[in-house]
Image (spheres, grey):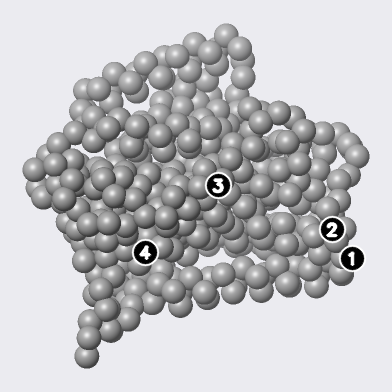
Amino acid sequence: MPKLRWYILLIIFLLMCGTRWYYTTHKGRISNDYRRHYLAAKDIREGVNPYLRDEAKFKYPLFNAILLAPLSLFDIDLSQSLWFALGVFMILCIWSMTWEMVGGREVATSACRSKPDGAEALAVKAPSAEDSVPAWVWLLPIILSLRFFWINLKLGQINLLVFYFTVLGLYIIERRGMPFRGGAIVGMAGVLKYMPIFFLLYFAVKRRWRECAGMMTGVIVCFVLIPGIFLGPSRSIELQKEFIKQGTRRVDQMVGSAVVSGESLHTFVYSILTPIDVSPKISMEAAKQGGSPIYINVVNLNPKHAQTIARIFCALILLAMGWFLRPRASETYLPGIPPRCMWEYGLMFMVLLVISPEARKAQFLTTYIPSATLIMGYYTISASGRHSPRVKWFLVLFILSQALLIGTSRVAGESLERFLDAYDGIGWGALILGLLMIPGVKIGQKVVAD
């Protein structure tokens, strides 16, 4: 992947900002998701409680509104254009950082010719000599994930900013050797939206205490100190209480609601255990207009019991992941391409999608990480000139996961899209991607004899 120069990024930023501004002013279209953040940032800047607004209701921590406050200085047309251009900038940075983390800048094709067979091929550290990698290795994961990045750009959602800071934090940890600072940035991402907070569990299981300390510091600074400095202690505490109260009410509504809109396996388990309307997963607009409900349940459990089972299902997945990733004193790991940490991060991202009760298509932009890791791993083995049956199954399952992800788009046709949306096909695709990370985690493992 070509290196990104600052002047190229600046030109792209200006072009994207101008293009979006022209489209916005002529079409008069403002994303509802971005409007929510824009108005909240404006309220915070003007000393108004953002949680009392009925229009474009704000449901995020105060730090989100404070961070985006500079964009509220402009009119909403220009502000949305700047946000769109920033989104494109962040996407390019995510692609570049991920390419470096999977070892794209370290691979030398001349070294691959003499590598051993199968998974051991990935456990050989490439020499420092640079050589070109075929363009498809870095283009294919981008193409496969482009739909999810575009959804976030089009809707102006906060997911892109959360994903950017998460990848940036992991990049600083792995490529810059600054675990505390990188952990703090991941913690900041967890304040913007809660799912990255689960990386604290990962670092704790791995006994990487500096990353844990950094994450906790990032959470405290962004959730407590910055709002306190910006708004004053008493006002900050008052609004934080309002956020917590609304968050609690929102969770209660989600649990007791007669419909579900999430597309993870958490919602799938819930939906097959109790009669609950899944039509919002197919069309949110039709569901709001009172369309016909859709049920996929196979039993008729009490909704509370079904929710309990779904939560236990998610808890077991987290426990199983923690047990699998735990460090073992009897094992060491040789360096590889992609490095072992990228397989573990890919597993983490997919587990977070699988267990989230609110995961929608926009959140599935994180499938880019395991896709990039898998494709680099497949290329490294293929370049060795030797293939094993396991690698072929590896490829078949990866194609299946992408088919399920693509099947939830309009490209697949309306009938297949509706079916896979109802039965959380996109969640099953994420599950397969997560399972494919497990063999990769074992790559480079070497058991040390007593």
Q: Distance between the residues labelled 1 and 4?
A: 39 Å
Quarter containing the C terminus: bottom left
**Furthest residue to the left?**
129
**Number of residues whose C-alpha sits closer than 10 Å to that of mark 2, classed few (under 14), some (14–19) or many (20 or more):** some
Q: Are marks 2 and 4 in contact (CB under 8 Å)?
A: no
Which numbered disc, 1 or 3, marks the residue that appears first in the sequence? 1
Q: Name the residue under label 4.
A: 441
Is 213 above or below relative to 24? below
Query: Is residue 407 shown left or right of residue 142?
Result: right
Which structural element holds mark 4? helix
**Furthest residue to the top?**
26
Quarter containing the N terminus: top left
Pick whichever, 361 or 196, lies toward us.
Answer: 361
The circle on residue 401 is 3
At label 2, the amino acid type is Asn
Which numbered disc, 1 or 4, marks the residue that appears first in the sequence? 1
**Number of residues whose C-alpha sits closer than 10 Å to that of mark 4, classed few (under 14), some (14–19) or many (20 or more):** many
Q: Do the residues labelled 2 and 1 touch (CB within 8 Å)?
A: yes
The circle on residue 300 is 1
Which structural element holds mark 3? helix
Q: How far apart are marks 3 and 4 (CA)?
A: 19 Å
